[in-house]
Image (cartoon, grey):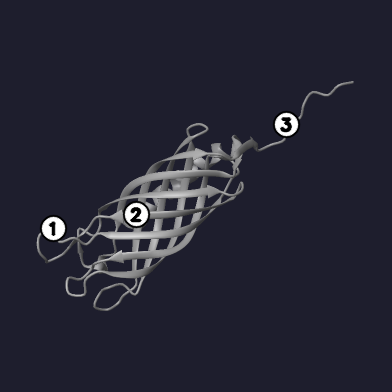
Amino acid sequence: MNRGLCTLLAVAMLAFAVPAWAAGSAAHDQTYVNLFGGNTFLSGASGLAHHDGNTVLGLRFGQRLSAHLGVEAQVAAAFAHLQDAAPNADANQYSGALLGNVYAFASPNTPYVSLGLGASSNRFNQDLGRGTSLMGVLGLGYQYSLGDHFGLRLDVQDQLLFNTPTPSAANLNNVQVTGGISYFWGGSKKSAFPVIGPSHP
């Protein structure tokens, strides 16, 4: 199910990419904050109840360093519960990561690839308790500008948790699907193509 959902979202992002490439101005040196929400599809090996649908909320702070490169910090909380334990036993995931973004086009409307590293605090087992794991992130996203200061964003991230607090200390694979709104400030925009003025005799 996760694989089919990710494929569908990837096709939708590519469909938006054509008009984004054909028009728009180059954007760089912009600082932004992004408030997002969605779902984290936790690995079935995690042993969590309802692992296939857990609400996630988070915040990103970043900068588009150039037309095609950017960097951002991300923090998030995914809400989950232990399976076969006391009712409503908290098993929330708290994570933070530093990500690098590679934008396909210079336009403010563009798909991008994210790659990063961070840490995730999880509780998968009642006896072992909460533990912190190294987290690798690989993502695909699309951002759409609503003007000079606001924009929409869609992200699909594959999060690999290493040496998790489970009896087998397994590596777990989670998929996070989120959408959010961004606020931009600073930076500059210029035409993606040179503008040639009228010639004079």
Q: Quadrant of the N terminus?
A: bottom left
Q: Nearer the viewer, residue 73 or 36?
A: 73
User: On screen, 133 above or below 190?
Assistant: below
Going from the N terminus, do you reach mark 2 or mark 1 first? 2
Q: Residue furthest bottom?
A: 168
Task: Tell me the crowding category of disc 3: few under 14, some 14 to 19, or many 20 or more residues within 10 angstroms, Cα based.
Answer: few
Q: CA distance from mark 3 to mark 1?
A: 61 Å
Q: Quadrant of the C terminus?
A: top right
Q: Residue at x 79, y 23 (%)?
A: 198
Q: Nearer the viewer, residue 136 or 74?
A: 74
Q: Residue at x 38, y 49 (%)?
A: 59
Task: Tell me the crowding category of disc 1: few under 14, some 14 to 19, or many 20 or more residues within 10 angstroms, Cα based.
Answer: few
- What residue is disc 2 on? 76
Amino acid type of disc 2? Ala
Q: Do residues under tags 3 and 1 come within 8 Å of each other at their CB atoms?
A: no
Q: Secondary structure at mark 3?
A: loop
Q: Secondary structure at mark 2?
A: strand
- What residue is disc 1 on? 88
Q: Which mark is residue 56?
A: none
- Left-right relation of 179 to 185: left
Task: Tell me the crowding category of disc 2: few under 14, some 14 to 19, or many 20 or more residues within 10 angstroms, Cα based.
Answer: some
Q: Residue at x 21, y 75 (%)?
A: 128
Tell me where residue 197 sits by quadrant: top right
Amino acid type of disc 1? Asn
Q: Position of residue 44 (x, y in %)?
A: 26, 65
- What residue is disc 3 on? 195
Q: Secondary structure at mark 1?
A: loop
Q: Residue at x 33, y 46 (%)?
A: 37
